[in-house]
């Protein structure tokens, strides 16, 4: 594996990092203290600048209007953007839109691409992904009560979903529902496009996450589908392919997530080290950085971040060169390893900041609130560990 970064990518990363430092990090205090509706116009101006710099949609093909970066290249960009919660959204490579774009590009029909894919890539509309259900284990996509029953030329969808990220203000949802309940467990569900203004699509609430409901893109919706009727032409791919499509969506998506988490680690680590050097704790002017326990924490965090980063890059390299199936073990490893490293680094940085770390005067409390979920969504840590162990043990039978 070659760790050399091409000259093209060095230029791109320099531009991205400079934009994050100069344009986005200074916007964080307003992001943390003001309603999203107030800062949305400012964010749109930043997005216009990104388009002018030709940095829009790093991982989308050039023919769709993106930069055309491969998975390894986008991983490096995702790390840079992850240093701020605004990064991926402003550069338009944010979940769940990025996964929906990949699905529609690979499996959407011509009409779906014209109506939904092209406006979504341009940033003219937003989307959401509706899979997790309220009373069922989200780590097992085979457990699903939402149904899509054929009536005439339509599907009629009924069910209750939650953690439908960014449903507030989205123009359409990709819904996973059972269309073939009598089929085998992996062939029962399908993915269907549902415009959010369809009668029967009811956004019940933005779910409070550790006390913060959020709004707009930065929210998680609970949705009730009540006799929600859409044309059968809104089916993505074939009936019964929902589970397979979900797996296609999650493989590269975990690289995006994990490198974003490395970016968060880098930001938290920078704040940790700066705080240790600045915080005076004795009358003679000694700082936290003079204490061996702080030095040990810094060394441990640096080593863990580097180890996690190399794991993700290796997984990305395998996916890019050998396919997601060949990289199954690496994908499982990075999901729980990087999420735990991120939590450890954020917690350490918060501890070093003391009372300041509990406030929104730094970005740390936001990271602490919202990124704890990394050990749960896209499969809880325990699920990935069990899956990985089973794969490994097969080699010893």
Image (cartoon, rainbow, N blue to C red):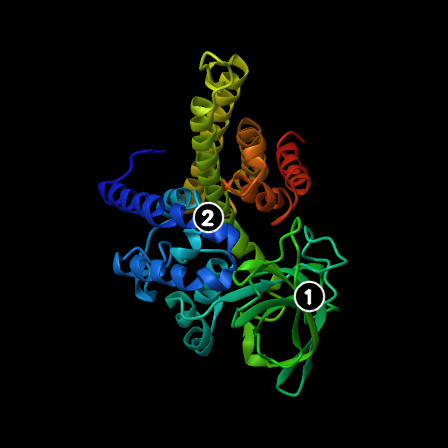
Residue bearing mark 2: 29
Q: Secondary structure at mark 1?
A: loop
Q: In the rendered image, which quarter contains the C terminus?
A: top right
Q: For the residue labelled by badge 2, is the local secondary structure a helix, a strand or a loop?
A: helix
The answer, for residue 100, to whether it is visible in the render is: no
The image quarter in which residue 367 lies? top right
**Mark positioned earlier in the residue sequence (1 or 2):** 2
Horizontal side, residue 288 vs residue 180: left or right = left
Tell me if label 1 and label 2 are in contact, CB under 8 Å.
no
Q: How many marks?
A: 2
Q: For the point 65% across and 34% down, which residue is it?
A: 389
How much space separates mark 1 and mark 2, taking CA atoms? 46 Å
Q: Is residue 286 above or below residue 209?
A: above
**Is the residue 49 above or below the residue 74 in the image?**
below
Label disc, if present, on residue 362 of the rendered structure: none
| Residue positioned most to the bottom | 152
Instruction: List x then y, in percent, for residue 143.
Output: 73, 58
Residue drawn 62% across the image and 53% down it? 212
> Which quarter of the picture shows residue 180?
bottom right
**Residue 276 in view:** yes
Q: List x then y, in percent, for residue 351.
A: 58, 28
In which quadrant will I find the N terminus? top left
């Amino acid at each position: 594996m070659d760790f050399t970064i091409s000259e093209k990518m060095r230029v791109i990363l320099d531009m991205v990092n400079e934009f994050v430092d100069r344009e986005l990090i200074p916007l964080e205090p307003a992001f943390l203290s003001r309603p999203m509706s107030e800062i949305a116009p400012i964010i749109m101006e930043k997005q216009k600048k990104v388009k002018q710099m030709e940095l829009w949609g790093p991982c989308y093909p050039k023919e769709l209007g993106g930069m055309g970066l491969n998975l390894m290249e986008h991983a490096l960009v995702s790390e840079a953007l992850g240093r701020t919660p605004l990064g991926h959204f402003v550069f338009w490579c944010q979940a769940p839109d990025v996964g929906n774009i990949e699905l529609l590009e690979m499996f959407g029909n011509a009409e779906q691409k014209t109506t939904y894919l092209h406006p979504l890539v341009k940033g003219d509309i937003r989307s959401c992904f509706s899979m997790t259900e309220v009373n069922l284990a989200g780590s097992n996509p085979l457990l699903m009560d939402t149904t899509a029953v054929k009536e005439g030329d339509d599907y009629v969808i009924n069910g209750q979903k939650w953690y439908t990220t960014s449903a507030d203000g989205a123009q359409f949802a990709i819904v996973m529902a059972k269309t073939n309940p009598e089929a085998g467990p992996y062939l029962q569900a399908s993915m269907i496009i549902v415009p959010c203004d369809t009668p029967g699509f009811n956004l019940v609430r933005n779910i409070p996450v550790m006390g913060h409901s959020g709004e707009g893109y930065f929210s998680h919706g609970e949705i009730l589908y009540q006799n929600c009727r859409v044309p059968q032409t809104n089916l993505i791919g074939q009936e019964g392919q929902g589970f397979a499509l979900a797996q296609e969506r999650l493989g590269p998506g975990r690289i995006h997530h994990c490198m974003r988490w490395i970016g968060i680690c880098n930001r938290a680590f920078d704040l940790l080290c700066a705080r240790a050097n600045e915080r005076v704790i004795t009358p003679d002017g000694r700082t936290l950085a003079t204490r061996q326990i702080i030095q040990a924490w810094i060394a441990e965090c640096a080593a863990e971040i580097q180890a996690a980063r190399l794991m993700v890059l290796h997984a990305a390299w395998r996916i890019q060169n050998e396919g997601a199936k060949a990289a199954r073990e690496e994908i499982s490893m990075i999901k729980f390893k990087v999420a735990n490293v991120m939590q450890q680094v954020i917690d350490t940085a918060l501890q070093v900041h003391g009372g300041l770390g509990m406030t929104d005067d730094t970005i740390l409390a936001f990271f602490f609130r919202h990124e704890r979920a990394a050990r749960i969504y896209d499969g809880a840590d325990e699920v990935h560990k069990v899956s990985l162990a089973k794969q490994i043990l097969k080699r010893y039978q």
